[in-house]
């Protein structure tokens, strides 16, 4: 059952954008459902033109591997050949780079939020703020 909807996605994105303003960095936010299908995306003022692609690809990776991209980065360092192969199998679809976290409800993952435009740590902080805003 798909639980991620537009209202939740917008709420998460607004919270992530608010955190970005607090940090003083431009930020693009993408929210996907549990299967990685795009629900909402918004490019922040001043964010790079490709940040819409990278924020979505971060969210897709997070949703499909059921963990933050910060954790995926650690796994990538331990087994880079797998991540190279995944990139070849689904080119442009997954980006295990810091900046996406799962969105949960009732103890299970219903989607993910990916952010891009700041440093990896800023992206992660904004994504976390977005996910926390809709946690229920």
Image (cartoon, rainbow, N blue to C red):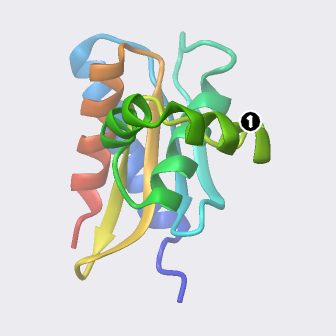
For the point 45% across and 51% down, the residue is 62
| Furthest residue in direction bottom, as rendered | 1
Image coordinates of residue 38 in percent, x first then y, are 65, 55
Res 90 seen here: no
Total numbered labels: 1
For the point 35% across and 54% down, the residue is 67
Going by the image, does 23 lie left or right of 102? Answer: left
Image coordinates of residue 95 in percent, x first then y, are 57, 35
Q: In which quarter of the image is the C terminus?
A: bottom left
Instruction: Write down the quadrant of residue 53 in the picture.
Output: top right
Kind of element beneath mark 1: loop
Going by the image, does 93 lie left or right of 125? Answer: right
Identify residue for label 1: 92
- On screen, residue 41 above or below 53: below
Instruction: Write down the quadrant of residue 94 in the picture.
Output: top right
User: Is 90 or 52 nearer to us in this picture?
Assistant: 90
Image coordinates of residue 71 in percent, x first then y, are 31, 42
User: Is 39 or 14 nearer to us in this picture?
Assistant: 39
For the point 66% across and 45% down, the residue is 86
Image coordinates of residue 111 in percent, x first then y, are 46, 64
For the point 22% across and 20% down, the residue is 22
Res 70 seen here: yes
Going by the image, does 50 lie left or right of 131? Answer: right
Q: Local crowd at mark 1 within 10 Å, few (<14), some, or many (≥20)?
A: few
């Amino acid at each position: 059952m798909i639980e991620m909807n537009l209202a939740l996605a917008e709420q998460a994105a607004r919270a992530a954008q608010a955190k970005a303003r607090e940090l003083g960095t431009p930020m693009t936010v993408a929210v996907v459902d549990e299967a990685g299908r795009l629900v909402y995306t918004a490019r922040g003022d001043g964010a790079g033109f490709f940040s819409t692609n990278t924020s979505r690809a971060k969210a897709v990776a997070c949703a499909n591997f059921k963990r933050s991209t910060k954790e995926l980065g650690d796994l990538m360092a331990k087994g880079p050949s797998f991540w190279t192969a995944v990139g070849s199998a689904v080119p442009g679809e997954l980006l295990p780079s810091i900046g996406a976290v799962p969105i949960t409800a009732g103890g299970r993952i219903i989607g993910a939020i990916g952010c891009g435009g700041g440093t990896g740590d800023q992206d992660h902080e904004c994504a976390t703020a977005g996910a926390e805003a809709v946690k229920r």
